[in-house]
Structure formats: C-alpha cells, structure tokens
Amino acid sequence: MVVEDETQLAGLIGSYLERDGFEVAVVHDGLEAVEAARALDPDVVVLDLGLPRLDGVEVCRQLRTFSDAYVVMLTARSEEIDTLIGLSVGADDYLTKPFSPRILMARIQAMLRRPRPLGTSSDALEGARTFGALIIDPLGRDVWLDGEPLALTRTEFDLLAALSERPRMAFSRRQLIDAVWGPTWVGDEHLVDVHVGHLRRKLSDDATHARFIRTVRGVGYRMGTGQ
C-alpha cells in the first residue's frame, strides 16, 4: 500500500512496485490509509510523513494497533527528529526525499526476505533462548517477559533475535544492519540506536544498568544475561 499525497510520486512508486510483481493500492490521505489498511491487510506500507487529515506518524501509530505490516516512512524533511519520531511509533525503515525508486524497491525486497511469523505450535519452545525473565522463541517468533507475551514489531523481533543468537558477541551497528536490514542497506546507521531504544522501553530495560541489551562502548551492542 502506497500512502502519498503527491499523486505523481504515488503513481511512480506504484508503477515500480507493480513492475516488481506486487499488488498495489494507492491512497492519498491519512484517514483513508488507516481504513484501507484494515480492509486490505497489506504486507508493506510506503508511508509519507506529511499527509492531509492524519499525518504519517499518527497513521503509523494506528497501524501498529492492528497490523504487523512493514512500514517504510518517507519524509521531505531531513531533520533527524522527523526520522526519530517516525521510527519511535514503529516504522521499520525510512527514506528522505528525493530518493531513487530502485533503492526503495531494494529496501522492500530485503524486508520481505525476512522470515514471516509462523505462529505457535506444540513444540514452539524448542530452541527458545532464555535471559533471566526474558524468553525468545525464534521458531514461533514469540517473546515473553516475566511470563507475559511481549508485542514487538517484526523489525524489533529481528533485532532481538540477531543479538540473542550470538549472546557473547558485541555487534557493531553495521553488523546489525547487515543481519536485520540486509548488506545492501545504505543510510544512517543510527537507525539501529532508535530501534534499540524502542526495544529497551518495551523490555523495561535501563541503558545504564541494562539486563537485556547492553551498550558496548565504541563498538555497538550485545545481549545481556537478564540479571
């Protein structure tokens, strides 16, 4: 689903997506986007920040209450705060206008190559990873904290899964980008910091005395023990 009030740009993005084999719906304002997402259940939403009626941040916030679609936020403003606000409500990636449609297509294809949620099965906890009160089930893509299920976006889960797969390893931002967004991703690597911050809030983790995601000064991040 393409949500963009600039009709020419929306049509261009839609044509590139259709050329890549996607079914495409194009909408031009925020309220229509939320209604369309409920009806269509899209896999990916390309979402402009500056929309009439509801802006992109509010659309993304509402989407996250019922949809696990990947969200790529588009913004005409390069100020970092716009990007941070967009990502803090659950956007998975972002592009600043003007951008190459080919880069957007590459980002979307990389997202869709990630594993999809498989649901819970009778052996869902086989291979689960435990860090104190935190349990991560890579097979079922489920996470529990203190026995309660934790709602994560797909990107948040992928980031947590990458860290927990090799818990003794200190990952650089670039290594996490390669693991989660793909080796062809190009942009501001502080994207990782935003998603780590969002994860920490959901995990009730303190960056100073982190139980689950620890900062490795001068390097990046590593998994904590849960203690």
Image (cartoon, rainbow, N blue to C red):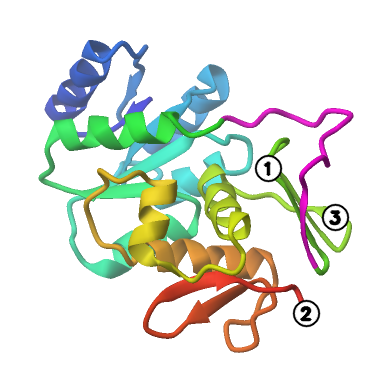
Where residue 52 appears, x then y in whole percent? 31, 41
- What amino acid is found at the position of numbered circle 3 in the picture? Glu
Q: What element carries label 3?
A: strand
Q: Which residue is drawn at 59% across and 88% down?
A: 208
Q: Residues within 10 Å of mark 2 (few under 14, many from 20)?
A: few
Q: Is residue 73 above or below residue 69?
A: below
Magenta span dominant secondary structure: loop
The disc placed on residue 138 is: 1
The disc placed on residue 129 is: none
Count all numbered tags in the image, as a single digit: 3
Pick the front one: 94 or 172: 172
Q: Which residue is drawn at 54% across and 48% down?
A: 158
Say which residue label 3 marks. 148
Q: In this view, does 148 lie above or below 202?
A: above
Query: How much space separates mark 1 and mark 2, taking CA atoms?
Result: 21 Å
Where residue 203 appears, x then y in whole percent? 69, 67
Image quarter of residue 38: top right
Residue 92 appears anywhere in the view? no
Query: How much space separates mark 2 and mark 3, taking CA atoms?
Result: 18 Å
Mark nearer the N terminus (2 vs 3):
3
Q: Which residue is drawn at 27% across and 47% down?
A: 185
Query: How much space separates mark 3 and mark 1, taking CA atoms?
Result: 16 Å
Mark nearer the N terminus (1 vs 2):
1
Where residue 195 appears, x then y in whole percent? 48, 61
Q: What stretch is highlighted in magenta?
A: 116-131
Say which residue label 2 marks. 227
Pick the front one: 227 or 4: 227
Pick the front one: 37 or 106: 106
Q: Residue at x 43, y 49 (%)?
A: 179
- What amino acid is found at the position of numbered circle 1 in the picture? Pro
